[in-house]
Image (cartoon, rainbow, N blue to C red):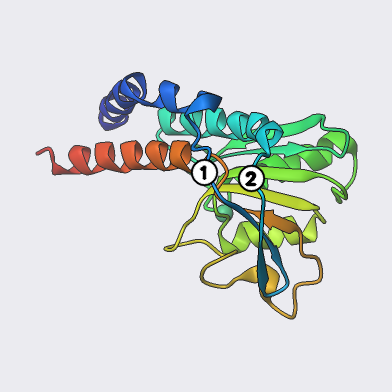
């Protein structure tokens, strides 16, 4: 069965490299962070090691998503008191739902957990730059801070494409920090797409 074969291949990839990349010490210390304010990018100093803990939760969700045959993207929502409100990974294939991105699922879960449609003061950690849909959901839910891992020039909607938070019609712009745990996130994505290419190349 194709799914089974694929999962085995991906799991093998994880065993080889991914668990190592998930260790905090493996995150590149020179990893740059930046904050996007309106249309302006401002570089801030690294040394935000506490934030890597939450990104690790997102990375674990991304790895679990890949094992389910989903594109490995994971997210975590953390409340203003640093309580973890939700974690989720992509489930588009599982749910037959094109909108079941990790960010959307995590936001829905976090909203349910606090009984509010708004997440003021909360932070969202996601392993990949959010797409335009997820950036819209982040804005609508009033999330205060967005931390993402790898950039996504192809489908990202924060620093690429629609640049949702820079649009004049965007009524709520979170502070945006990119590049956190980017190497680990990229490893997951590379392993996933390498395995998928191999799967489709196999007669
Ligand atoms: Zn998305």
Residue 96 in the image: x percent, y percent?
Answer: 50, 45
Residue 90 in the image: x percent, y percent?
Answer: 53, 40
Question: In this rendering, does residue 72 appear at all?
Answer: no
Label number found at residue 30? 1
The Cα–Cα distance between marks 2 and 1, rounded to whole angstroms, is: 7 Å
Is 74 above or below relative to 37? above
Residue 20 in the image: x percent, y percent?
Answer: 42, 22
The single residue placed furthest to the bottom in the displayed view is 168
Residue at 80%, 66% in the rendered image:
172
Label number found at residue 46? 2
Q: Quadrant of residue 46?
A: top right
Quadrant of image for the C terminus: top left
> Dividing the image into four equal quarters, which quarter contains ligand 1?
bottom right
197 or 34: nearer the eye?
34
Residue at 41%, 43% in the rendered image:
186
On the rendered structure, is 115 left or right of 19? right
Disc 2 + disc 1, Cβ < 8 Å: yes
Q: Secondary structure at mark 2?
A: loop
Q: Quadrant of residue 174?
A: bottom right
On the rendered structure, is 132 left or right of 146? left
Q: Secondary structure at mark 1?
A: loop
Is 165 above or below relative to 88? below
The single residue placed furthest to the left in the displayed view is 203
């Amino acid at each position: 069965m194709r799914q089974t074969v694929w999962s085995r291949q991906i799991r093998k990839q994880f065993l080889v490299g991914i668990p190592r990349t998930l260790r905090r010490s493996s995150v590149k210390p020179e990893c740059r962070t930046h904050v996007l304010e309106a249309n302006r990018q401002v570089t801030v100093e690294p040394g935000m090691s506490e934030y890597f803990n939450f990104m690790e939760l997102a990375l674990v969700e991304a790895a679990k998503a890949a094992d389910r045959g989903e594109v490995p993207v994971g997210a975590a929502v953390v409340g203003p008191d640093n309580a973890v409100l939700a974690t989720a990974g992509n489930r588009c294939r599982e749910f037959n739902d094109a909108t079941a991105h990790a960010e959307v699922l995590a936001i829905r879960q976090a909203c349910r957990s606090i009984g509010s449609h708004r997440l003021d003061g909360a932070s969202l950690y996601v392993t990949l730059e959010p797409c335009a849909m997820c950036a819209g959901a982040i804005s609508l839910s009033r999330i205060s801070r967005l931390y993402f891992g790898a950039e996504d020039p192809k489908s990202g909607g924060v620093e690429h494409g629609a640049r949702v938070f820079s649009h004049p019609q965007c009524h709520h712009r979170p502070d945006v920090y990119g590049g956190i745990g980017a190497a680990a996130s990229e490893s997951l994505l590379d392993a996933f797409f390498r395995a998928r290419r191999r799967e489709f190349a196999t007669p």
